[in-house]
C-alpha cells in the first residue's frame, strides 16, 4: 500500500481508478456483501442503485476504509490496497460524504474542515491560513456558507454543504456522494451538479448513491445495481430504462409507483390562520386540511413548508396566528398534547429527530403510546403487552427481518421509516403530518409508504404531505399548497395541479418580490 500522504498514479480519464473483485463483508449473523465486483473509472460518475438493505452503504464504507472487507481484492490507482483505514483512504485520495454527517456540532465550519489535518507553522496552528483556504474552497464551490458559523446553528442544507466542502479539501481522486441532494435547494443542487461536471473533467471518479431517477438520468455514466448484497448488473446509463433499473433493483416489476387514492373530503381537521413562526420561516400562512384527503405542501428546501407542519404539531414556536384541530383552537401546540388530540408527525430527519437509534424497534414503536393503559400499569411498562402489540404491527408493515428487538441503528432507511409508521398504529390517530416521507428510501419502500398513506386516507384520516419531490406531491395530493419564502404562493386543485403551475408559482412570486 502507498505510504500515507502519497497518492497512487492518476489514471487517464476512462481508465480504471478503483477495482473491487469478489468483495465480501460479514457481520455477526449477516452476509452484507456477497462477492461484489465494482470498477470505477477516472472521470466517470458511477451510480450505486439498490433497495435499502441491498448493501450500498456497506460497500461504500468498505471503500472508505470504515469496514475491513472479509474477502476479495481492492485495487486503487493500480495499487493493491490492504488494511485500509479512513485516514489512509483520505491520504490516497478517497473522500466520502455520507448521509450521516461527520461534523462536530460545537465547532465552526472551518474548524470542521481542518479537523485532523490542521495547518501549522513552527508547531503553532496557522488559523489565518486555514481561514483563507476555507473561504477559497467555499467560494470555488459556490456555496452560501459562512466558515465562521457553528455547525449546530446551521440548517441541514448548510451542514450538507460543509460535508461536501470537507470532502473536497484534500487531493481527491475518488469522491463518494451518498444521497447528497436530499437537503439541498434546487439552486444548490444545480451548483452541485456543475461542481460534479468540473470534477469529472479533472479525471476525478465519483461514486454516487441516489434513489432519484432524475438525478441518475442527469448525471450517471454507468449504474451498478445491487440486491441482497450481490452485484446484479452494471449498465450504461444512456441505454437503460427506468423500468429496467427498478426491475433489476427489486427483482420484480413495479408498474405503478403512485397508487390511485380515493379522496372523500370531509370535515375540516386542521385549520391554520395567519400563522407565523418565531424564526420568521413561516409568515402569515392560511391552510385547511380535511379528513379523507391528502393536502400537499410543495416548495423548495428552505421555503418554510417543514416549519409549517412542525408548528402545527408544536415543535416550532408560534409567534402569531392560530391553529385549530377539528374546530378547537389550540393556543400553544406541543407534541404531547398533539398526540393526545390524535395528531402524528413524521419528521424528514429520521435519525436526528424521529428515532432513538440505539434502542430496539419495539421501544421506538411504542414510545408515543406509553401513556395508554395497554402499554403500562401504574407507570410501569408492560413489556409482554408491548411485544404482543408491536410484533403484529411490524409484520403488517413487512419489516425485514421481523425482529423487533434489533437496534434501529442497524436498519436500512426504508425499515427505519416503517418503524416510524408503526407508531401510527400503536395508538388511535386520525391526523398525520408527513415531512418528506420518501427521503432516503428506495423505490420498493416508497411504494409501501404510499400504500400506507392510501390506507390512512381511505380510512377517513386527514393527511398533510410535505415534499420537495414534485412528482410525489402532485401524484398523492387532492389539493396542493405551494410555498415560497415562508408564504403561500398558490393553492392548486383539480386540473390546475401540474408541475408547470407549481414552477410558475415560484417564478411569479420571485417577480413580485423583485418588483416590490
Image: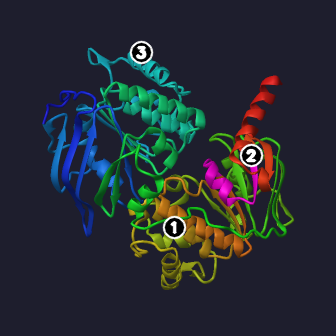
The dot on residue 128 is 3
How would you rate the neighbour count of disc 1 (Cα within 10 Å): few for under 14, some for 14-19, many for 20 or more?
many
Residue indicated by mark 1: 418
- The CA distance from mark 2 to mark 3 is 44 Å
x, y percentage for residue 335? Answer: 68, 61
The dot on residue 180 is none
- The CA distance from mark 1 to mark 3 is 48 Å
For residue 127, above or below residue 22: above
How would you rate the neighbour count of disc 2 (Cα within 10 Å): few for under 14, some for 14-19, many for 20 or more?
many
How would you rate the neighbour count of disc 3 (Cα within 10 Å): few for under 14, some for 14-19, many for 20 or more?
few
Q: Nearer the viewer, mark 2 or mark 3?
A: 2
Residue 359 among those drawn in magenta: no
Task: Look at the image and tell me whether residue 129 can be seen.
Answer: yes
Check whether the beta carbons of the residues at disc 2 and disc 3 lie within 8 A of each other: no
Q: Earlier in the sequence, mark 1 or mark 3?
A: 3
Q: Earlier in the sequence, mark 2 or mark 3?
A: 3
Q: Which residues are magenta?
A: 467-482
Q: Nearer the viewer, mark 2 or mark 1?
A: 2
Check whether the beta carbons of the residues at disc 2 and disc 1 lie within 8 A of each other: no
Q: Nearer the viewer, mark 1 or mark 3?
A: 1
Residue 470 among those drawn in magenta: yes
Q: Earlier in the sequence, mark 2 or mark 1?
A: 1
Q: Residue furthest front?
A: 239
x, y percentage for residue 215? Answer: 49, 43
- Report the side of 229 relative to 330 (left or right): left
Looking at the image, which is closer to me, 83 or 7?
A: 7
Residue indicated by mark 2: 482
Q: Residue at x 76, y 70 (%)?
A: 292
Q: Quadrant of the C terminus?
A: top right
- Report the side of 205 relative to 7 (left or right): right
Residue 199: name its quadrant: top left
Amino acid at each position: 500500500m502507498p505510504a500515507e500522504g502519497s497518492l497512487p498514479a492518476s489514471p487517464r480519464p476512462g481508465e480504471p481508478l478503483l477495482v473491487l473483485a469478489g468483495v465480501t463483508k460479514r457481520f455477526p449473523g449477516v452476509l452484507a456483501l456477497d462477492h461484489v465486483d465494482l470498477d470505477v473509472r477516472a472521470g466517470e460518475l458511477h451510480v450505486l442503485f439498490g433497495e435499502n438493505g441491498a448493501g450500498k452503504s456497506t460497500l461504500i464504507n468498505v471503500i472508505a476504509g470504515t469496514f475491513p472487507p472479509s474477502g476479495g481484492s481492492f485495487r486503487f490507482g493500480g495499487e493493491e490496497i490492504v488494511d485500509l483505514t479512513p485516514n489512509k483512504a483520505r491520504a490516497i485520495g478517497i473522500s466520502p460524504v455520507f448521509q450521516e454527517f461527520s461534523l462536530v456540532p460545537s465547532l465552526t465550519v472551518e474548524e470542521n474542515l481542518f479537523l485532523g489535518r490542521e495547518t501549522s507553522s513552527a508547531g503553532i496552528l496557522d488559523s489565518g491560513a486555514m481561514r483563507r483556504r476555507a473561504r477559497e474552497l467555499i467560494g470555488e464551490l459556490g456555496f452560501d456558507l459562512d466558515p465562521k458559523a457553528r455547525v449546530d446553528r446551521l440548517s441541514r442544507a448548510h451542514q450538507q454543504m460543509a460535508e461536501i466542502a470537507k470532502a473536497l479539501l484534500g487531493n481527491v481522486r475518488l469522491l463518494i456522494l451518498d444521497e447528497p441532494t436530499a437537503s439541498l435547494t434546487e439552486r444548490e443542487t444545480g451548483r452541485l451538479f456543475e461542481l460534479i461536471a468540473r470534477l469529472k473533467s479533472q479525471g476525478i471518479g465519483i461514486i454516487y448513491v441516489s434513489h432519484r431517477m432524475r438525478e441518475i438520468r442527469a448525471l450517471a455514466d454507468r449504474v451498478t445495481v445491487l440486491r441482497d448484497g450481490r452485484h446484479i448488473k452494471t449498465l450504461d446509463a444512456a441505454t437503460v430504462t427506468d423500468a429496467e433499473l427498478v426491475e433489476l433493483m427489486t427483482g420484480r416489476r413495479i408498474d405503478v409507483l403512485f397508487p390511485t387514492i380515493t379522496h372523500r373530503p370531509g370535515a375540516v381537521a386542521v385549520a391554520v390562520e395567519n400563522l407565523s413562526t418565531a424564526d420568521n420561516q413561516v409568515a402569515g400562512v392560511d391552510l385547511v386540511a380535511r379528513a379523507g384527503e391528502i393536502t400537499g405542501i410543495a416548495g423548495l428546501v428552505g421555503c418554510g413548508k417543514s416549519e409549517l407542519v412542525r408548528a402545527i404539531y408544536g415543535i416550532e414556536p408560534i409567534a402569531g396566528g392560530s391553529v385549530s384541530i377539528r374546530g378547537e383552537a389550540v393556543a400553544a401546540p406541543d407534541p404531547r398534547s398533539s398526540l393526545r388530540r390524535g395528531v402524528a408527525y413524521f419528521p424528514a430527519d429520521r435519525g436526528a429527530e424521529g428515532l432513538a437509534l440505539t434502542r430496539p424497534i419495539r421501544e421506538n414503536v411504542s414510545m408515543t403510546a406509553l401513556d395508554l393503559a395497554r402499554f403500562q400499569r401504574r407507570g410501569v411498562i408492560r413489556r409482554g403487552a408491548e411485544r404482543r402489540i408491536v410484533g403484529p404491527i411490524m409484520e403488517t408493515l413487512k419489516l425485514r427481518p421481523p425482529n423487533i428487538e434489533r437496534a434501529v441503528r442497524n436498519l436500512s432507511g426504508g425499515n427505519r421509516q416503517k418503524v416510524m409508521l408503526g407508531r401510527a398504529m400503536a395508538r388511535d390517530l386520525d391526523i398525520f403530518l408527513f415531512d418528506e416521507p420518501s427521503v432516503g428510501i428506495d423505490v420498493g419502500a416508497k411504494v409501501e409508504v404510499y400504500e400506507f398513506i392510501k390506507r390512512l386516507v381511505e380510512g377517513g384520516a386527514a393527511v398533510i404531505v410535505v415534499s420537495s419531490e414534485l412528482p410525489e406531491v402532485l401524484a398523492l395530493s387532492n389539493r396542493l399548497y405551494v410555498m415560497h419564502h415562508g408564504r403561500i404562493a398558490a393553492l392548486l386543485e383539480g386540473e390546475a395541479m401540474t408541475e408547470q403551475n407549481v414552477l410558475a408559482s415560484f417564478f411569479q412570486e420571485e417577480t413580485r418580490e423583485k418588483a416590490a
